[in-house]
Amino acid sequence: MSIGSTISPYGQNIDARVEQLKATASNIVSGTNPSYVVADFVSLYPQFGPDVNDKYVVPETILQVFIDLANVCILQARYKSSWQLCMGLFVAHWATMWLQSTADAGSPAAKVIAIGQAKGLRVSKSVGPISTSIDYNTVAQDLDGWAAWKLTTFGQQLATMAKMFGKGGMMIW
């Protein structure tokens, strides 16, 4: 009799228990997500939705592209009840990055960009007529290896959530 078909004294298939243990130890999750559409995103982050003229700050087609990307990267099986928030953070991060590459400085989108940009601590010192200042982005320093996710407050929040829910590295058996 092979190990795969061995039944434990408790009536459980040992092979199934080994597979469950490997899945838990590997930290790899799989599954499908429920529906998430532009309206779901805009309900969390109305600043990306229609303005007073009913024109979206970020075109709906662009938001849909980021939602499609988020559906591949953000699985409900990992984020559980925080999944919608994480989907929104993912889309808001990329929408802010997109706005930075397209918006005019005086446009309404510039306000959305300014709010979403990552900010650090500013330290200034003056002695007589000489002064100096340095910006420290302490949050971004704690997210080493997260590259572009450090550039927006949305990305920083998502990276923090991912670290909490990821609970360590992965192992593939």
Image (cartoon, grey):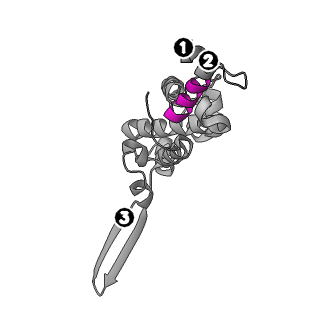
How far separated are the C-alphas under marks 2 and 3? 62 Å
Of badges 2 and 3, the one in the foreground is: 2
Across and down, in percent, residue 108 comes to: 50, 43
Residue for badge 1? 2
Secondary structure category for the residue under label 2: loop
Residue for badge 2? 6
Query: Quarter holding the C terminus?
Result: top left
| CB atoms of marks 2 and 1 within 8 Å | yes
- The part of the image, by quadrant, that contains residue 36 is top right
**Which residue is outermost to the bottom?**
128
Across and down, in percent, residue 104 comes to: 40, 41
**Which residue is outermost to the top?**
1
Q: Amino acid at mark 2?
A: Thr
| CB atoms of marks 3 and 1 within 8 Å | no
Q: Viewer-proximal residue, 30 or 142?
A: 30
Q: Which residues are magenta?
A: 17-28
Q: Amino acid at mark 3?
A: Asp
Of badges 3 and 1, the one in the foreground is: 1
Q: Left or right: 108 with respect to 85?
A: left
Q: Is residue 54 visible?
A: no
Magenta residue check for 110 = no
Magenta residue check for 19 = yes
Residue in the image at 56% along x and 16% along y: 4
Residue for badge 3? 135
Residue in the image at 49% along x and 33% along y: 26
Residue in the image at 39% along x and 72% along y: 123
